[in-house]
Image (cartoon, helix red, strand yellow):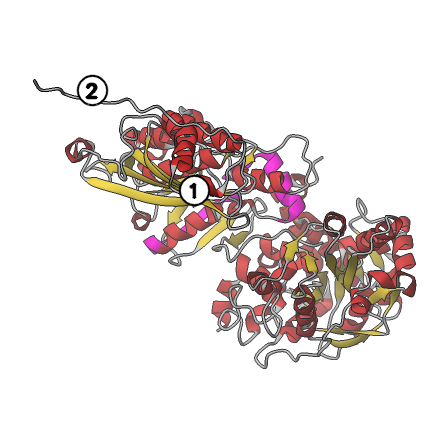
């Protein structure tokens, strides 16, 4: 099994779609309004657009695209902070490629690089640590972003740095956590959601337990889903089945990767290195309590926010920007006033248009410009 | 008594130090030695021999090949200089030869301008020049003129090459990106994405079991075979930076037509596919250095495929899609999954995903 082609089998897709159609017809509420299912994770959004899944589902199902793209929810002010640190002559600023194009109020990291800042693309935080070892006369700062998927790898890198006695390495920590995000979505008065596709790779780390509140308190079904198109379709089917049967449970469709209890060594490393922040600013969603992590005092020497003076200025989004509404799923990408006109991948106003997991980028790249044209 | 002096055969200079210095770019003897040692000895041919400031080519001899001159230029800055399947020299020759050949031209003469960073090892340069010479011979072209500069450390990245090529186009050939018509078939000559994946693999830490090799190759022979079997071929481009997707968009835009391709028919090496899946890259945008995209009238498509598959550089040729009348400039792909997605032009660079 290569776990790629088998999960893209068109025949199996046809059967699943058929089953989905049967299920939808058996759900009474679907006759009055579309059943709204939110995929939290940007990777799912990307998959949905890449395979044209939305167009294949019955019209009674509406897929709502959630804010699970860590690059997309980065406030402009934090990007400015990155640029300020990167511009320091002694700094090598190491970052994942995707974050390089996000616009700050005075340009992106890519533009700062063209202006002379030493910004380097890395595939993993361990690459950044290797840079620190190689360039002992420079300060290497790693731009740590991502949900729980990437938090263990940066935690382990900090532990490695400490074990190796590396002093010229630090993280600019912008890690965020998924549970407060989902809670903020559920508490939002703008949204009427019937179910969720849970984030596959975050769950690989945290397991499925943390989502119990969605089922028990908010009484909504959630299915933790894989990223191949058959995974997404099967998960949608599982959500619909719960709705039809009046259940609200947390189910795991991605069991081949996601253990119910999560990944203990990863979680242990995270707990050792990080603690929750009181609150953290999200682009478009405002301030969310306990939604970010920071380095514990014991690891302060690896915290770029304590090593350097960070401007830390809150920058308001451009007036025409509707990123927040798209991130919450209140509007679709093409309903944003500036989608495709003032905001394009070449001239992005927000990260949603440049991140490989951004809903606007996915929509712009893969299609739906048809839908946009139909709507205008 | 008239004494006719015998022409003196010049002996070629040699460089006896291991690394290039600024002196080798100074215009004096050191530079001549560098040029002789590295380039002249490798490219040795009668048009280059005189080492005038320009190569002189007989116009009537050129005109015997056709009625239009094809003229192209390209710079090569690839890093690393040597990668699985090729090197900067091979790339330079193939890239320029192919740029001529996709216009239906017979490639004839190349120039080579080299910008060399001080400190580069002479042996490295000799290897590159040897590779260029071998590739030129394979492609049936000659290096007839060139230029060499040496710059300070840091002013360039080891070696930059610029090659310019000229060729001649037969009167009966007219290829153009704007000539695609609804009903035409889109054909590629083999597996896509090898070069892009090879370079990324050679740079990063992917530690693949079997490194992916670049498909770098001179395609003039293949293209001759194609155009002989399918003389009605409308358009040809090589799918270099930006990959297949970019060429398709260029064709669709120039011809004001729509193109639809079939993911099932788009040939990929399984290692390239896997590589792309891990990094979150789209193979449609990866560079190729030995692949052409051809638009062929429907009634010549079968003959085109037979001719391509008979050639060593076209064994896995495949018809991947059709030109339609539809939204002008729009390229779409029918996915293996049965859905349809747009294949847009690449914006900026493809960057690997985070999570």
Q: Is residue A240 above or below residue B251?
A: below
The residue lying furthest to the left in this view is B1
Q: Is residue B167 above or below residue A297?
A: above
Q: Can you tell which mark lies on residue B6?
A: 2
Q: Please report the residue visible at 75 percent of the width from the left and 80 percent of the height from the top.
A: A189
Compare residues A82 and A284 and report the one nearer the observer: A82
Q: Are marks 2 and 1 on the same chain?
A: yes
The answer to if B260 sits in the magenta stretch is: yes
Q: Chain of mark 1?
A: B
Disc 1, SS: helix
Q: Position of residue B15 (x, y in %)?
A: 46, 30
Q: Position of residue B267 (x, y in %)?
A: 52, 36
Q: Which residues are magenta?
A: B254-280
Side of B109 relative to A81 (left or right): left
Side of A365 relative to B51 (left or right): right
Compare residues A268 and B336 and report the one nearer the observer: A268
Q: Quadrant of the N terminus of chain A?
A: top right
User: In this orientation, does residue B347 appear?
Assistant: yes
Side of A151 relative to A354 (left or right): right
Q: Is residue B8 above or below residue A221?
A: above
Side of B220 relative to A228 (left or right): left
The answer to if A157 sits in the magenta stretch is: no
Q: Earlier in the sequence, mark 2 or mark 1?
A: 2
Q: Is residue B306 above or below residue A8?
A: above
Q: Please report the residue visible at 7 percent of the width from the left and 17 percent of the height from the top.
A: B1
The residue lying furthest to the front in this view is B1
Q: Chain of mark 2?
A: B
Q: Position of residue B13 (x, y in %)?
A: 40, 27
Q: Position of residue A316 (x, y in %)?
A: 65, 80
Q: Can you tell which mark lies on residue B25?
A: 1
Sort mark 1 into few (<14), some (14-19) or many (20+) by Cα contacts within 10 Å: many
Compare residues B306 and A160 and report the one nearer the observer: A160
């Amino acid at each position: 099994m290569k776990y790629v082609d088998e999960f893209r089998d068109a025949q199996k897709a046809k059967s699943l779609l058929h089953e989905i159609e049967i299920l939808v017809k058996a759900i009474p509420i679907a006759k009055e309004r579309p059943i709204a299912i939110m995929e939290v994770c940007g990777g799912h959004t990307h998959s949905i657009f890449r395979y044209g899944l939305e167009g294949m589902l019955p019209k009674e199902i509406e897929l709502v695209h959630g804010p699970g793209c860590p690059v997309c929810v980065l406030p402009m002010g934090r990007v400015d902070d990155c640029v300020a640190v990167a511009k320091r002559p002694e700094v090598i600023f190491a970052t994942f490629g995707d974050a390089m194009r996000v616009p700050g109020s005075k340009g992106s990291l890519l533009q700062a690089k063209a202006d002379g800042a030493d910004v380097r693309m890395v595939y993993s935080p361990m690459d950044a640590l290797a840079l620190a070892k190689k360039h002992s006369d420079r300060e290497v700062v790693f731009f740590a972003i991502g949900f729980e998927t990437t938090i263990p790898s940066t935690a382990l890198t900090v532990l490695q740095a400490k074990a190796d006695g590396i002093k010229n390495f630090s993280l600019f920590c912008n890690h965020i956590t998924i549970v407060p995000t989902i809670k903020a979505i559920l508490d939002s008065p703008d949204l009427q959601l019937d179910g969720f596709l849970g984030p596959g790779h975050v769950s690989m780390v945290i397991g499925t337990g943390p989502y119990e509140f969605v089922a028990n308190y908010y009484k909504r079904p959630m299915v933790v889903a894989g990223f191949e198109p058959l995974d997404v379709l099967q998960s949608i089917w599982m959500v619909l089945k719960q709705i039809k049967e009046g259940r609200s449970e947390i189910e795991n469709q991605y069991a081949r990767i996601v253990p119910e209890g999560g990944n203990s060594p990863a979680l242990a490393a995270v707990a050792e290195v990080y603690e929750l922040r009181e609150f953290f600013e999200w682009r478009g969603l405002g301030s969310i309590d306990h939604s970010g992590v920071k380095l514990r005092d014991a690891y302060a020497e690896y915290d770029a926010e304590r090593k350097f003076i960070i401007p830390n200025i809150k920058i308001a989004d451009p007036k025409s920007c509707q990123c927040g509404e798209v991130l919450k799923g209140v509007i679709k990408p093409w309903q944003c006033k500036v989608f495709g006109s003032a905001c394009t991948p070449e001239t992005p106003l927000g990260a949603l248009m440049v991140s490989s997991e951004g809903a606007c980028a996915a929509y712009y790249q893969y299609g739906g410009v048809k839908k946009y044209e139909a709507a205008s | 008594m008239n004494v006719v002096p015998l022409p003196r055969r010049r002996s070629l200079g040699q460089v006896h130090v291991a690394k290039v210095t600024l002196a080798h770019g100074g215009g004096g003897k050191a530079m001549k030695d560098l040029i002789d040692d590295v380039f002249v000895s490798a490219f040795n041919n009668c048009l280059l021999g005189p080492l005038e400031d320009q190569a002189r080519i007989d116009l009537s001899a050129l005109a015997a090949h056709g009625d239009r001159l094809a003229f192209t230029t390209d710079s090569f800055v690839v890093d690393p200089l040597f990668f699985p399947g090729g090197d900067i020299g091979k790339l330079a020759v193939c890239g320029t030869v192919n740029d001529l050949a996709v216009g239906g031209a017979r490639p004839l003469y190349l120039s080579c301008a080299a910008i060399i960073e001080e400190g580069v090892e002479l042996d490295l340069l000799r290897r590159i020049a040897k590779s260029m010479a071998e590739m030129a011979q394979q492609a049936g072209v000659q290096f007839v003129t060139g230029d060499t500069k040496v710059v300070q450390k840091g002013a360039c990245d080891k070696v930059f090459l610029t090659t310019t090529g000229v060729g001649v186009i037969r009167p009966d050939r007219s290829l153009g990106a704007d000539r695609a018509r609804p009903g035409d078939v889109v054909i590629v000559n083999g597996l896509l994405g090898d070069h892009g994946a090879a370079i990324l693999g050679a740079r990063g830490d992917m530690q693949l079991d079997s490194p992916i090799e670049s498909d770098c190759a001179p395609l003039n022979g293949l293209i001759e075979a194609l155009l002989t079997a399918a003389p009605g071929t409308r358009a040809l481009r090589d799918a270099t930076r930006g990959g297949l997707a970019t060429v398709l968009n260029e064709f669709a835009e120039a011809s004001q037509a729509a193109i639809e391709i079939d993911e099932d028919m788009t040939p990929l090496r399984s290692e390239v596919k896997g590589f792309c899946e891990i990094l979150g890259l789209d193979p449609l945008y990866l560079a190729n250095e030995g692949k052409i995209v051809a638009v062929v009238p429907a009634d010549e498509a079968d003959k085109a495929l037979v001719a391509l598959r008979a050639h060593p550089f076209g064994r896995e040729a495949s018809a991947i899609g059709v030109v339609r009348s539809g939204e002008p400039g729009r390229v779409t792909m029918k996915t293996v999954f049965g859905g349809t997605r747009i294949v847009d032009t690449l914006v900026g660079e493809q960057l690997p995903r985070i999570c």
